Image (cartoon, helix red, strand yellow):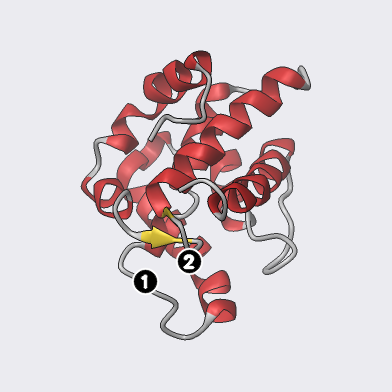
Amino acid sequence: MWYNLSMNAKDTVEKYGSRILENETYRRIAQQKHHLRSTVGNHSLRVAGISVALNRGLRMGMDEQLLVEAALLHDMGMDGRYEPGGKADLSHVHPVDSLGIAEEILGETLNPLVEDAILYHMCPIGGHPHSRLGWLLCIADKIGAVGDFFIP
């Protein structure tokens, strides 16, 4: 799973994402096919690593815990879904379902910035993020999706 993350990003993702990575739903999506060659779990790890790398590389100074949480949770709503209503339907529905799962996992510690990032990570579908964290997740998700087609 960690094939393309630097050791620093891997350590950061493990440090801030352990509660999510150990969750039963995450363990299921870690095995679920996504973007033809990858899994939802590998995609989420890739997005977390990209988010951390962009934040550091661009010296954005964002809270890395919030970045990691948003990245690992953004596609949790894909759990058990294999595009039943077509891609457009899934694109609109899974962010809302992902937020519900995020609320279950993080409870009262779920930050409003993470909520916004999860809900709007499919931008421009369904609206746009209202924070820098949300925009960074959106961009990292698109970069990660491209990588999913080349690196499982």
- Viewer-side label of 2, 1: 1
Is residue 138 visible to the viewer in this orientation of the structure?
Answer: yes
The answer to which of 128 and 5 lies nearer the viewer is 5
Amino acid type assigned to the residue bearing label 2 in the image:
His
10 Å crowding of disc 2: few (<14), some (14-19), many (20+): many
Question: Which label belongs to residue 81?
Answer: 1
As drawn, which residue projects farthest toward the left? 24
**Residue 52 x %, y %:** 60, 26
The answer to which of 23 and 2 lies nearer the viewer is 2
Q: Relative to 16, is 67 on the left or the right? A: right
- Residue at point 38% right, 35% down? 1
- The secondary structure type at the circle numbered 1 is loop
- Residue at point 73% right, 19% down? 57
Disc 2 and disc 1: Cα gap in Å? 9 Å
Q: Are marks 2 and 1 in contact (CB under 8 Å)?
A: yes
Q: Earlier in the sequence, mark 2 or mark 1?
A: 1
Q: Which residue was labeled with disc 2?
A: 94
10 Å crowding of disc 1: few (<14), some (14-19), many (20+): some
Q: Relative to 32, is 71 on the left or the right? A: right
Amino acid type assigned to the residue bearing label 1 in the image:
Arg
**Residue 23 x %, y %:** 25, 42
- Residue at point 71% right, 60% down? 123
As drawn, which residue projects farthest toward the front? 150
Q: Relative to 116, is 9 on the left or the right? A: left
